[in-house]
């Protein structure tokens, strides 16, 4: 151990204190031993450092910071180097603000378009998500700040996120849900990682030995530390025993007591605690040294960072439709602008990633800076969906006078928020009504869409142009104008498939898990892996995006090291193409998707220019996870190597003979017949059990039993206590009302889904676990017993510990004075 001496000088209480937060955003410092505190902050697309009251839902204002495009947008660039550049800017701002750990990037897999946090995640594909995340990690860490890829792992729904159990087979876990993290850890060398709220196959992610030690440390060589998501720690001592280092936020003395008791009772081996501390301190001292030696300026150049956010946004934009070459708009055409989103930009999502931007563009101002002939603006519709015929009437009048109509549409703030999944994929009806009304008087409609996830587009035939901006950050409006006018040639390519309708999505019958479990019955067939295999038509395929120029793909060579292909810009303007490499294996003995992304490269070419592009094979190209040998294996035989401009637009194809490993297929093809056909939308219990290799866990609440610490406040509808049932009604009423009004109350949403143990974990030490147990007794109808426990718990909370205590600025408890 590196810090053996230091650790041996610590009392048990001091050791215990270091495993929980000091406040909402910082770790404990111990002055007498020279152990500093480190500061953490969200998040993935901009720093959310809270100067005042702390919360983890973006409710209280944070210090102004540059808001870059969100991950869903950045993934469309297919440009990890740009991710790295953005990461560098983030790292710089973090350093200026005294932050040591930046809580991002988020790289959970987009299992369903409905997940409320899809805007914060990269892709439905683990390879693309991992490469982008690794770029961010390298960029952030190059500035002396640790990145924190999150939420590890299988965290693809917001509903009941703090206690839901993601049930899936080991192969799906490895190939789909952890490969991205593997790339972020191995290639990005992430110094920290955030464990997810949910359980994975019955075990909380923060105490999952297999995930935290077996895979993360033993297989990937991770040598950093694991931070629990805020309130994700369940059994703190078990978490530490199984590979978690730091529970966040503070749990006051509770955290110390739990660890001290666990060591004394033999539940937690002190040598394991020491090992965790050694791993944790190794990173802490590295970060502090970087902070001390970097010559950090006291401020950053707001304008320079804003321009970099704009340039990043320009690469994110995806051109999805361009009939009759309506784009770029020719000069002298009279442009009418319609849509609330032109005035009130939608540029980020809600929740812990919410950035307080240094500046904010809107489209109307951005258009004023151009020579374009904009003849007017009309709101067109009410943002939160209420129908308003007067607004449509005015929009139609403007459309009549215009040569081209730019319609700024999108999802509102309620639709994409941490803590809440969407329940459909539709655009608000009043926006569709506005398109229909405008289309009757003017066929030249270009839609500019702002949404962090896929939407259904039954209106697509009524418009000639469609530009998807996703959520472009604070400087996105100018970038969109640049694309519309042709100053920038669009080069974004979709990092997720756009199904025609929600019912087509592979997990439609299984998503979201509504009670105890979320069953991943579709297995590895996520996104395009399903659409391509089952030949289900989509609106826009994975990897798709148009350009103002065209590229030819020629002379494919497949060697044992990878592919080489000639790419030429055969159009009239400079532009970029994303060359995508997919792999397929005909006659496979294991079942497989018919195409899997295994490499890509983005090239920028002047008109007429050519380049030879090499995409190497790597350790992931031919591997699959074999649940019989419990290791990665390679099936021997002939593989098809496909080079395309999207998963559905394969331009060239070659073959390669690959020598496999000797492992046998672990599957009985008859037992898994639907998986072998890719026909996974209605997998029955027997087949899913065969895939899992075990019986299905109980998925429903037992409403006859008393509620336990891991049941949620939202389950109080079957509580024995009448008062608890009334309290729930009030909470539910506030929650539903806020959603109806278009401003979801994130606090209430969080409370609704919080397990009772979370009350102790999230109150900064004000409520101990014993007190939470007392509250639960009351909820279960044992009023007196509950009150007694509550009082006893409050008294225990005041017992002195050996560790010096003092209030810190976030209301938590600090140890040993200041840093
Ligand atoms: C989110 C994390 C975030 C943390 C701290 C949690 O609710 O899931 O992504 O980093 O809060 O704000």
Image (cartoon, grey):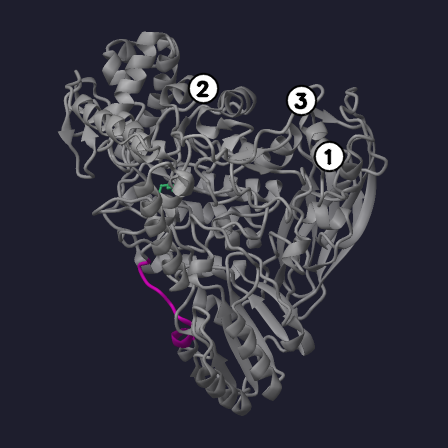
Q: Position of residue 315 (x, y in %)?
A: 53, 59
Residue occupying the point 70% across, 30% down: 691
Q: Is residue 590 above or below residue 131?
A: above
Residue occupying the point 72% across, 20% down: 628
Q: Main secondary structure of the magenta part?
A: loop
Q: Is residue 778 magenta?
A: no
Residue at which label 3 appears = 631
The disc label shown at residue 561, or none: 1
Q: Secondary structure at mark 3?
A: strand
Name the image quarter holding residue 7. top left
Crowding at label 3, few (<14), some or many (≥20) Cα neighbours within 10 Å?
A: few
Q: Is residue 358 magenta?
A: yes
Instruction: Give yes or no for contact between labels 2 and 3 (Cβ–Cβ under 8 Å).
Output: no
Q: Position of residue 682 (x, y in %)?
A: 71, 44
Name the image quarter holding residue 30. top left
Q: Secondary structure at mark 1?
A: loop
Viewer-nearest of discs 2 and 3? 2
Say which quadrant the C terminus sits in.
top left
> Is residue 777 toward the left or the right of residue 71 in the image?
left
Q: Determine if residue 374 is in view.
A: no
- Gap between marks 2 and 3, in whole Å? 21 Å
Please report whichever mark, 1 or 2, sits nearer to the chain's N-terminal start.
2
Name the image quarter holding residue 248. top left
Q: Determine if residue 193 is in view.
A: yes
Q: Secondary structure at mark 2?
A: loop
Residue at which label 2 appears = 242
- What range is drawn magenta here? 357-366
Residue occupying the point 38% across, 55% down: 67
Viewer-nearest of discs 1 and 2? 2
Q: Is residue 751 above or below residue 606?
A: above
């Amino acid at each position: 151990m590196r810090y053996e001496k230091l650790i041996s000088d610590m009392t048990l209480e001091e050791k215990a204190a270091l495993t929980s937060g000091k406040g909402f955003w910082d770790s404990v410092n111990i002055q007498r031993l020279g152990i500093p505190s480190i500061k953490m902050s969200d998040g993935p697309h901009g720093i959310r450092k809270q100067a005042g009251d702390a919360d983890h839902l973006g409710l209280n204002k944070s210090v102004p910071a540059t808001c870059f495009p969100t991950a869903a947008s950045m993934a469309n660039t297919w440009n990890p180097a740009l991710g790295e550049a953005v990461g560098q800017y983030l790292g710089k701002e973090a350093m200026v603000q005294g932050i040591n750990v930046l809580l991002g990037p988020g790289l959970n897999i987009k299992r369903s378009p409905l997940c409320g946090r899809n805007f914060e995640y990269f892709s439905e594909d683990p390879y693309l998500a991992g490469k982008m995340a690794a770029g961010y990690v390298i960029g952030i860490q190059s500035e002396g700040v640790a990145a924190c890829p999150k939420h590890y792992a299988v965290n693809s729904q917001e509903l009941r996120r703090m206690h839901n159990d993601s049930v899936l087979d080991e192969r799906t876990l490895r190939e789909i849900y952890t490969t991205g993290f593997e790339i972020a850890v191995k290639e990005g060398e992430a110094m920290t990682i955030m464990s997810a709220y949910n359980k994975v196959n019955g075990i909380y992610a923060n105490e999952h030995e297999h995930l935290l030690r077996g895979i993360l440390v033993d297989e990937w060589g991770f040598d950093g530390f694991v931070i629990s998501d805020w309130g994700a720690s369940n059994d703190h001592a078990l978490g530490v025993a199984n590979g978690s280092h730091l529970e966040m936020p503070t749990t006051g003395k509770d955290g110390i007591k739990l660890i001290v008791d666990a060591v004394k009772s033999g539940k937690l081996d002190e040598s394991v605690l020491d090992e965790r501390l050694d791993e944790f301190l190794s990173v802490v001292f590295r970060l502090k040294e970087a902070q001390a030696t970097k010559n950090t300026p006291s401020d950053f150049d707001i304008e320079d960072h804003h321009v970099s956010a704009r340039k990043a946004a320009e690469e994110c934009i995806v051109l999805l439709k361009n009939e009759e070459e309506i784009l770029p708009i020719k000069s002298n055409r009279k442009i009418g602008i319609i849509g609330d989103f032109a005035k009130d930009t939608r540029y980020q999502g809600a929740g812990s990633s919410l950035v307080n931007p240094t500046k904010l563009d809107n489209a109307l101002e951005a258009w004023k800076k151009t020579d374009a002939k904009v003849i007017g603006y009309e709101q067109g519709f009410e943002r939160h969906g209420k129908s308003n015929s007067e607004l449509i009437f005015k929009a139609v009048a403007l459309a009549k006078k215009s040569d081209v109509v730019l319609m700024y549409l999108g999802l509102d703030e309620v639709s994409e928020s941490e803590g809440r999944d969407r329940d459909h994929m539709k655009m608000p009806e009043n926006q569709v009504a506005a398109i229909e009304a405008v289309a009757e008087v003017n066929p030249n409609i270009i839609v500019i869409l702002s949404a962090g996830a896929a939407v259904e587009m039954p209106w697509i035939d009524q418009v000639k142009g469609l530009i998807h901006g996703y959520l472009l950050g604070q400087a996105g409006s100018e970038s969109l104008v640049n694309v519309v006018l042709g100053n920038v040639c669009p080069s974004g390519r979709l990092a997720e498939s756009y199904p025609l309708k929600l019912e087509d999505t592979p997990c439609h019958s299984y998503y979201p898990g509504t009670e105890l479990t979320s069953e991943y019955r579709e297995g590895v067939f996520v996104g395009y892996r399903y659409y391509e295999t089952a030949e289900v038509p989509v609106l826009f395929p994975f990897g798709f995006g148009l350009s103002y120029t065209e590229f030819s793909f020629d002379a494919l060579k497949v060697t044992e090291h990878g592919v080489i292909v000639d790419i030429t810009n055969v159009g009239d303007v400079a532009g970029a193409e994303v060359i995508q490499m997919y792999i397929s294996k005909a006659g496979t003995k294991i079942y497989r998707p018919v195409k899997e992304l295994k490499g890509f490269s983005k090239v920028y070419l002047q008109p007429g220019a050519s380049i030879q592009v090499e995409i190497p094979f790597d350790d992931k190209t031919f591997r699959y996870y074999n649940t019989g040998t419990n290791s990665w294996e390679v099936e021997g035989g002939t593989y098809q190597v496909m080079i395309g401009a999207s998963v559905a637009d394969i331009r060239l194809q070659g073959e390669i003979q690959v020598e496999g490993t000797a492992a046998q297929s672990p599957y009985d093809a008859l037992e898994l017949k639907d998986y072998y056909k890719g026909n996974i939308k209605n997998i029955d219990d027997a087949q899913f059990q065969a895939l899992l290799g075990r019986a299905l866990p109980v998925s429903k609440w037992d409403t006859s039993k008393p509620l336990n610490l891991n049941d949620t406040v939202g389950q109080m509808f079957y509580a024995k206590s009448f008062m608890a049932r009334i309290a729930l009604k009030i909470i539910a009423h506030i929650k539903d009302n806020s959603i109806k009004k278009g401003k979801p109350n994130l606090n209430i949403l969080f409370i609704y889904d919080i397990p009772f143990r979370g009350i102790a974990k999230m109150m900064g030490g004000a409520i101990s676990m014993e007190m939470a147990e007392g509250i639960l007794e009351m909820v279960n109808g044992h009023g007196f017993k509950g009150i007694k426990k509550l009082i006893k718990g409050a008294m225990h909370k005041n017992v002195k510990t050996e560790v010096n205590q003092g209030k810190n600025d976030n209301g938590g408890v600090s140890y040993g004075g200041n840093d």
